[in-house]
Image (cartoon, rainbow, N blue to C red):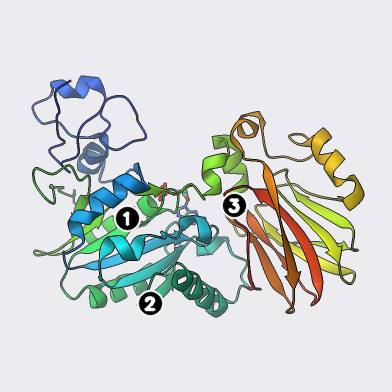
Amino acid sequence: MEDIYCQGCGTAIQTTNKDEIGYTPASALEKDVVLCQRCFRLKHYNEIQDVSVTDDDFLKMVSQIRDEKGLVVHLIDIFDVNGSMIQSLARIIGDKPILLVGNKVDLLPKSTNKKKLINWLKKSAKDAGIKVDDVFLISSIKGHGINELTREMEKARDGQDVYVVGTTNVGKSTFINQLIQQTTGDKHVITTSYFPGTTLGFIEIPLDDHSVLIDTPGIVNKQQMAHYVSKNDLKTITPTKEIKPRIFQLNSQQTLFFGGLGRIDFIKGNKQSFVCYFSNHVSIHRTKLANADKLYEDHVGDLLSPPDEETRGILPDLVQSTFRIKEEKMDIVFPGLGWVMVPDINTTVVVHSPKSVAVSIRPALI
Ligand code: GDP
């Protein structure tokens, strides 16, 4: 097939993979104006659709905007901060100002200390080498925090364009669709190629007569739990409403399983209550440490679920890391899955999580 480019965003058209950039059904190639499905939906339904690219392709794409002026809005999922922080961001966007936006705040219990969360996000960004100008918490679904953020975006962009970047599944399409509703109401959005003749795949939404908001494709980050579970399991582990803490009183030498996707062995410390924050659909199971390996072997996929069968085909083996907790009230975070608050000082735990989805620790949010 000779190369055909989308007349909306300029990306190369392909007809084989629905989830990747440039897809359009073969039948649409007959039309006079060929659009990729993403531009087609935006033009006719006023709606942004998610597409993804690999880290490498993203690097190539954004290297072309490195020297442009503008504001970067980096959207992350507060339920999966490790998996959604783009480590290479600073390197690829040049020295543009960055607003870090933590999405899905509606999932957190009301008692969450937002200030602590913001500080932790700042620290996580700094550890990833990203210098952020400000941090916001929003819910794209509920609309929480969107007005405050758009006001700040207006100020921070100073008449320049805005680039929205994020890994897949952080809620970028939901966020942009909220913005489209706010800025254009029912008016249909016109898309144009940002750099005519290049194969970018950025989509533009006009902000005013001179500047635009640019939706960049979602980056696939291999540290995201979402890539190692089936669609069904992703539904199960992704909370859809405010999570309810579940409390387990444990003696040392006991184990907690989070489905069969994560596990904490309580090795040493006083009897204490572990507070677990996971989707209400993930089963949590307590057992003696001495029985835990056998229980996992015999019951992963039934008593300990998810994973379902499809997930078990793609899930990396669980690997162990040891944490010696030296401060009161620390959260052990399983990115993309949830976290456990360990209350007592001088506690040793061994944490099991899928290889490549690194577990981390932070001062308790709640
Ligand atoms: P994208 O891949 O970054 O474009 O993400 P989507 O916009 O497709 O959203 C991914 C998933 O997260 C979907 O299931 C959304 O319903 C969900 N989602 C997006 N924003 C929010 C939010 O603010 N709160 C909650 N609870 N879920 C959200």
The alpha-carbon separation of the residues under discs 1 and 2 comes to 19 Å
Q: Position of residue 167 (x, y in %)?
A: 41, 52
The residue to which callout 3 is attached is 239
Q: Tell me the amino acid under the disc marked 2.
A: Asp
Determine whether label 1 and label 2 are within 8 Å by CB: no
Q: Position of residue 197 (x, y in %)?
A: 9, 42
In the depicted structure, whether residue 305 falls above or below residue 70 = above
Q: Nearer the viewer, residue 310 or 350?
A: 350
227 with respect to 250 (left or right): left
Eye-nearest disc, 1 or 2: 2
Residue at image point 13% right, 44% down: 198
Amino acid type, callout 1: Ile
Ligand 1 within 8 angstroms of badge 2 C-beta:
no
- How many other residues sit within 10 Å of disc 1, few (<14), some (14-19) or many (≥20)? many
Give how far across and how far down residue 193 sits, in percent.
13, 47
Which residue type does callout 3 highlight?
Answer: Pro
Tell me: is circle 3 under 8 Å from ligand 1. Answer: yes
Q: Quadrant of the C terminus?
A: bottom right
Callout 1 secondary element: helix
Task: Find disc 1 in the rendering and name its residue.
Answer: 176
* Cα–Cα gap, marks 3 and 2: 26 Å
> Could you tell me which quadrant the N terminus lies in?
top left
Mark 1 to mark 3 CA distance (whole Å): 21 Å
The answer to whether 351 is drawn above or below residue 17 in the figure is: below
Q: Position of residue 342 (x, y in %)?
A: 76, 69
Q: What element carries label 3?
A: loop
Pick whichever, 196 or 78, lies toward us.
196
Neighbour class for label 2 at 10 Å: few (<14), some, many (≥20)?
A: some
